[in-house]
C-alpha cells in the first residue's frame, strides 16, 4: 500500500504557496523560484479543474491510462476547459503563455529580461489563479495564506482600486455564506475609512475584521463605529435616538430615514423593530397598547 500520496489539488496549492513566498521575498533567485512554482501551480490547478469534469480528461490519450501515462500540458488543459464550457478570464491565455515562456527559459537555458517584467508575469499568474480558484475550485487565497501575508501580497499585485473591489467582494461573499444565527453587520473602518468591516468576523467571535486594511476591531470599538454612523445620520435632525430592544445599545434611530416603512433601525445589530406610542405621553415604545417606563413608574407611584 502506497504511504506517500500527494493529490493533484494539494500539489498545486503547495507549489502556489511556495511561489508566493519567493515572490514576496524578492531577490533574483527568489524570483526565479517564484517563476517556476507559480507556473507549475497554474498548470496543476488547470488540470485539477479539468479532472473535476472527468479524471480521464487530463490524460493526453484517455485510452492509455497508467502510472506513466502522459497528461496534457497547461495549454491543452486550458483549451479542454474552454471546450467544456468553462468561462476563463479575458486575456488569461496570453498572460499564462508569457509566464510559461519565461519559466521554460529559466528552467532549460537562461533568462534575460527586466526584473519588472518578471514581477509582472508572476503577478499576473497569481492574479489569474486567485480569480480562477475562487470561481472554479471554491478556494480562497485569503483563507489559505496568513492574513498579514495575504494583505502584503494583495498590495503587491493589485492597484488600490482593485484591492478595494476585492475586499468588498470578499466581504459580500462572507455575508452571503454566514449562518443566519450570526447576523453579521457591515461598518465603516475607523482605520482606513472603507465600508469593509464585518462584525462578527465568524461565528462565536467577539471581534470584527476589515477586509481592506486587515484591522480587527473589538466589540467596544464596533459599538463606537455604530454610534458614529448613527450620529452621521442624525446630524440633520428629525429622527430620535433610542435604546435598541434587541441588543441594548443606544444605537437605534426612529424613524429610519433610509426607507418609508416607519420602522426603527439599529446601527449595531441591524434590528428593525416596529415602534408604537405610549398610551399616556406618546413617547416611542416597542409594543402596542402599553405605557413607557417613565409613565409606568409615575402610575405605580400614585
Image (cartoon, rainbow, N blue to C red):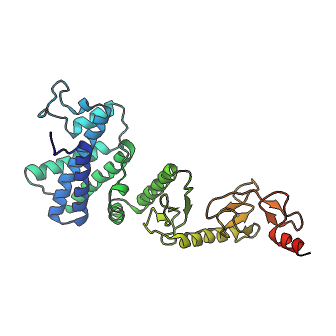
In the figure, is residue 227 to the left or right of 91?
right
Q: Residue furthest top?
A: 63
Camera sees residue 134: yes
The residue under the point 54% across, 70% down is: 219
Image quarter (top left, top right, bottom left or bottom right) of the N terminus: top left
The answer to which image quadrant residue 69 occupies is top left
The residue under the point 55% across, 64% down is: 187
Along the viewing direction, whichever of 4 and 118 lies nearer the viewer: 4
The answer to which image quadrant residue 62 occupies is top left
Q: Where is residue 80? Give x, y as percent.
A: 28, 32
Camera sees residue 98: no
In the figure, is residue 215 to the left or right of 182?
left
Q: Residue furthest right?
A: 302
The residue under the point 22% across, 47% down is: 11
Q: How many marks?
A: 0
Q: Where is residue 27? Give x, y as percent.
A: 18, 66
Q: Residue furthest bottom?
A: 301
Q: Where is residue 58? Give x, y as percent.
A: 23, 33
Image quarter (top left, top right, bottom left or bottom right) of the C terminus: bottom right
The residue under the point 23% across, 52% down is: 14
In the figure, is residue 299 to the left or right of 222?
right
In the figure, is residue 286 to the left or right of 246?
right
Q: Where is residue 5? Give x, y as percent.
A: 18, 44
Amino acid at each position: 500500500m502506497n504511504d506517500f500520496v500527494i493529490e493533484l489539488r494539494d500539489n498545486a496549492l503547495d507549489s502556489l504557496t511556495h511561489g508566493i513566498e519567493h515572490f514576496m521575498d524578492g531577490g533574483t533567485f527568489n524570483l526565479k523560484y517564484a517563476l517556476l512554482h507559480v507556473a507549475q501551480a497554474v498548470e496543476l490547478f488547470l488540470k485539477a479543474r479539468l479532472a473535476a469534469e472527468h479524471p480521464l480528461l487530463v490524460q493526453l490519450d484517455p485510452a492509455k491510462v497508467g502510472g506513466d501515462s502522459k497528461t496534457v500540458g497547461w495549454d491543452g488543459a486550458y483549451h479542454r476547459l474552454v471546450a467544456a464550457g468553462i468561462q476563463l478570464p479575458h486575456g488569461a491565455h496570453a498572460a499564462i503563455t508569457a509566464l510559461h515562456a519565461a519559466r521554460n527559459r529559466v528552467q532549460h537555458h537562461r533568462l534575460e529580461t527586466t526584473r519588472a517584467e518578471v514581477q509582472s508575469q508572476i503577478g499576473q499568474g497569481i492574479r489569474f489563479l486567485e480569480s480562477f480558484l475562487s470561481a472554479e475550485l471554491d478556494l480562497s487565497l485569503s483563507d489559505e495564506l496568513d492574513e498579514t501575508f495575504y494583505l502584503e501580497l494583495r498590495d503587491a499585485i493589485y492597484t488600490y482600486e482593485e484591492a478595494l473591489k476585492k475586499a468588498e467582494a470578499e466581504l459580500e461573499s462572507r455575508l452571503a455564506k454566514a449562518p443566519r444565527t450570526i447576523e453579521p453587520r457591515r461598518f465603516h473602518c475607523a482605520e482606513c475609512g472603507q465600508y469593509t468591516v464585518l462584525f462578527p468576523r465568524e461565528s462565536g467571535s467577539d471581534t470584527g475584521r476589515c477586509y481592506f486594511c486587515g484591522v480587527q476591531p473589538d466589540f467596544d470599538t464596533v459599538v463606537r463605529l455604530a454610534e458614529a454612523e448613527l450620529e452621521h445620520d442624525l446630524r440633520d435632525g428629525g429622527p430620535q435616538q433610542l435604546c435598541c430592544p434587541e441588543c441594548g445599545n443606544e444605537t437605534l434611530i426612529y424613524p429610519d430615514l433610509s426607507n418609508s416603512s416607519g420602522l426603527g433601525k439599529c446601527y449595531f445589530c441591524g434590528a428593525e423593530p416596529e415602534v408604537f406610542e405610549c398610551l399616556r405621553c406618546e413617547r416611542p415604545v416597542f409594543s402596542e397598547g402599553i405605557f413607557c417606563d417613565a409613565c409606568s413608574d409615575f402610575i405605580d407611584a400614585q
